[in-house]
Amino acid sequence: MPKWGMVIDLETCTGCQACTTACAMENNRLPGENWQDVLFYSEGEYPNLNLSWLPRPCMQCENPSCVSVCPTKATYKDEGTGIVLVDWNKCIGCKYCMVACPYGVRFYMDEAPAVEPDVRAEFPASGRRSWNPPFKMPDEYEDASKGIGIQPKGVVSKCTFCYHKVSQAPAGVADLDEDNPETKEFTPACVRVCAPKSRFFGDLDNPDSHVNALIAEKGGVRLKEETGNKPQVYYLSGGGSPAVPGNRSRRS
Amino acid sequence: MDEINTGISRRKFLATTGTTGALAATVSLGVPGMGLEATSAEAQAAKTPNTVVTKNICHQCPARCGIDVYTTDGRVHAIYGTADHPISNGKLCPKGPLGIYVLYDPDRWRGPMKRTNPNKGRNEDPGFVPVTWDEALQTVADRLNGLRERGESHRAAMLYGRGWGASCAGLLGTFGGLYGSPNMPIGHSSMCSDGSIVAKGYTDGNASYNSHDYRNCNYLLMFGVGFLEAFRPYNNNMQMWGYMRGRKTPKTRVTAVDVHVNTTLAAADRGLLIRPGTDGALALAIAHVILTEGLWERSFVGDFADRQNRFVAGQTVTAAVAPEPVINAETGEATSPEITGEGFVEKWVTGLVDWWNIELKDRTVEWASEITDIPARDILATAREFGSTRPAMAIFERGAHSHTNGIYNGMAIHSLNALVGSLFAKGGMAYQMGPSYGPMPADANEFKDDWANNGDWKTQPRVDKKGSSDGYLLARNMMQEIGPNHLAGDPYKLDTVIFYQNNAIFTAPNGQVWEEAMKDVFIVDTSPFPTETGHYADIILPDHTYLERYQDSPTYPFEGYPLTQLRVPAIKPIYDTKYFGDVIIELGKRMNGPMADYYRALDSAENVLRHLAKGFETDPGDNGVNSWESWVEKGVWYKKPYFWQQRDGVFFEWDGTDYNREMTPEEVGQKLLKTPSGKFEFRSAALEANSDWIVGATGRDPANLMFPIWEPPVHPGGGDLYFVTPKVALHAEGRGHNIPMVIAHLQPTVGGRGEAFVEINPVTASARGISDGDRVRISSDAGSIEARCRVYAGVRPDTLVLPMEYGHWASGRWSKAVPTEHCGEATVNQSDRITGQAMYYSTKVQVAKA
């Protein structure tokens, strides 16, 4: 059983948001409903202004606080992949998980649209479906029990690590690399498009995976380790040994 | 066909071209191969057995990234980069995946239409009603035929924006030559980046954008290029960035120059915030340091005969005098004695000594610091790094040359490349080779009648006065002048204008003039979408979107070796639209006289493309593309390597195995440094040859106008703040403004989501009582607009920055709903008299709370 994880190299990330738009189209997200966002920050005064950015997917935590608060067990950790998913058949839209998530990466569908006119009205759907874009993903990919595809009204959604792709990967493969023709089609959209190759996707339980090598060699860190959520997304920021130690470090 | 069940192995599949054809030339996901690939691909295919992948090229910027378009059950649902495409390499920029929305945009035109309201204006409803293609085309043809019969064919024009290749814009010049109009076509290059092209033409003889070898470059000095936002090919730039900055040894060092902190400056080693329009002063000071500190590349530039560096600030130097050749009395052979003395001996450059004496000797870092507002220590550090790191490139674009002094800013920056020997070097810059296309189905020259060959139209100037001594004698195009010239009836009034990929009424600086001017012109628009220009149209002939059409496109300057790609329709056209190439051919067939026979010989755009592909039969691409069918299947033909390389001041040509064949100076002049001297000209012979006209038109000094000199920029508009309106990553060429996902992410650096903010420095804002989030009014002599303020400490206090994108008033519903107004309406229409470059960044404005 793989434990899929992602490594994001902040040293080469250009802040272009291709991860954001590729995710939105692959997963039929509403405009501005960014499962995979890039957050921008600035500090300092002219002329010494520091502009920085942080790409932020779901951290796919090992110990996800969103799962433990869910009253209907709609949110769960998929055993076969280590991916945190939402069963839209069980979700009641109470938003507890949105409060519990330390990373702000859960989304409620029935909010005011980020961009007007509302595309849900432009591409209306029948029944519980919230909209029906003409570019909808293939029917075979849709799976409400995993929160994949067109979302029903009144539920919460989140990044699936492109479960519909990743779960089709050959058994035992250590890394899903878009530059490898054999794994290209199973690589998550945000990783596949990343032009500076700042994203890497692989099995954290496989000691030989490239992602584990990168975390070791370049000093991968996780966000908000104090929460104990144990993200499966690691960030690299230069690779030098002096670093702010994370919770998983042992003092020597 | 079903690839899975044919038993074709991957190897066999690759070796066999043309196993599929036409629209069915699509590759199922599950091409079986060896081992893991077969397993994985089949598993994937089993889940979506009806998925087909077609090759195409992204349409949202000029880069021409190869894309794989995924279609399942008739729905196009995904776009990814083509893995074996040299530009995209499987990757995309943020615009790439959104192409699907372009196809399904609900605001697209449904078919051809004609106008019923004769009145034109922003607030006039055109009253479009559907017509048949036959009626629409015949209406246009009748109009063109009528003009020609009256001897007024010069009053018809075709204006194009992004032309892609031989099957669209490539057909326009032929049409103009057969029909008889100097205005068919007029390109948009003066509203794009001619300042760069022309500056290169006057110094190294290649009027073109450069190809670049970033992979081997160790230092990048960038002037106003937005390398991580807008410089093309953006997607590949970012791939190179990841390599140069992450995996390459040594890591490429980067200094970026701009007027605000964007992602490029933030990601660079050094960001220099320069006063707008003064990039040339910075480049001159860098050149000064390179010379005084002895950092120039002697193998390319040359040296003092005695190898003592005599470049000292404020002091002149002398050129070496070549001694008379010694003639051997017996053999008659001439030999040149070695040059001695204190003079400078130039190698692949001309005019260095004069340039130094007339201009450079006084261009110290302290002098430049005053002009550029950049600390002297930063200029000095940049110059030393740039001059001592090889290979190094200085690249520039509109930020540097979209000013009245643009020609000189561009020449000064490009001269840095000569000083460090980067031209045609590994890790340096070169120029783009073209593809091995086959001949067109027919030769247009055989279909010319007497009017085409000798008609009075040949005596008419172009309506934009390109090439006219009372206009822009040296420019390549002057599209921005067409509206004002037509309005004034000087040189004459246009009658009919066909627009292709061109929304000039919106994009021209001070487009309000065009709004008035185009009221009495019969306008044909061919965009698939409603536009401001389309709002003035009498006939709409909507194009297919790019996922619905065959279309060729040779690469934009990239890595030098030839490359051309193909758009292949993913699905049949959704609406009653027609590819623009076919519109031109169908119009041609309806013209009187022999030209109709030419277009009957062309038959269709697809037939043209099939003839172009015949060139590949005798010159197959590196990826095996040797036919129309294999081009359709792979989407790209390319052939490495680039043919030439300059190494340590010696030029070599590829001999089939390596850069081994040394070139003669004559060959270098013919093929690479295409100036009159066959060298890089600090003293531009071509400018000098036009000295009289330049003096008359600009009042410049004939003693120095041929050198890269400092000239203060002129800023019209009447305001106190510079107004810079850059392109951002999701804008590129502005074709995405109606895509909700673009609107949601346009200007992320300052939180511009849902609209574009004008960036105002905190000091500037507070002095005017403006707070963050306030709606402000930006005014110049051209007009005034409103936008919302974002107080941002990353922008110069003397500059406002508002990305160009919004303010559309006749576009799709999403675009029109964005509250930001159009920066072009506050931008004065002013052009560089030499390059013809429209100056989008030279206006000065005032800002106040709205």
Image (cartoon, coloured by chain):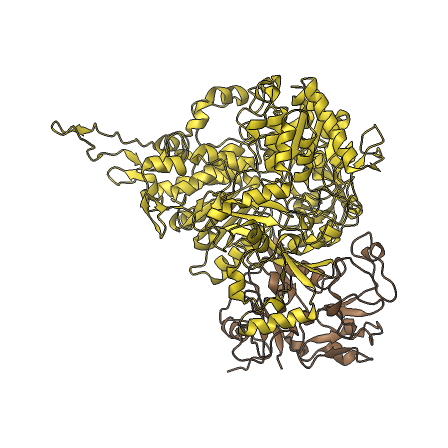
B661 to B507, vertically: above or below: below
B245 left or right, relative to B823: left
Indicate the position of residue A243 as horizontal and vertical percent values: 53, 71
Of the pair B777 and B443, the residue shown nearer to us = B443
Seen at 54% across and 21% down, the residue is B697
Q: How many marks?
A: 0
B773 to A222, vertically: above or below: above
A62 to B58, vertically: above or below: below
Q: Which one of the lettered chains is coloured brown?
A: A
| Residue B347 in sight from this viewpoint | yes
Seen at 25% across and 37% down, the residue is B305
Q: Which residue sits furthest left?
A: B330
Indicate the position of residue A107 as horizontal and vertical percent values: 77, 66
Quadrant where the C terminus of chain B lies?
top right
Quadrant where the N terminus of chain B lies?
bottom right
B290 left or right, relative to B435: left
Seen at 69% across and 32% down, the residue is B587
| Residue B368 in sight from this viewpoint | no
Of the pair B340 and B735, the residue shown nearer to us = B735
Q: Which residue sits furthest right?
A: A127
Indicate the position of residue B324 as horizontal and vertical percent values: 21, 27
B74 to B842, vertically: above or below: below
**Chain B, chosen colour in render:** yellow
Indicate the position of residue B751 as horizontal and vertical percent values: 70, 54
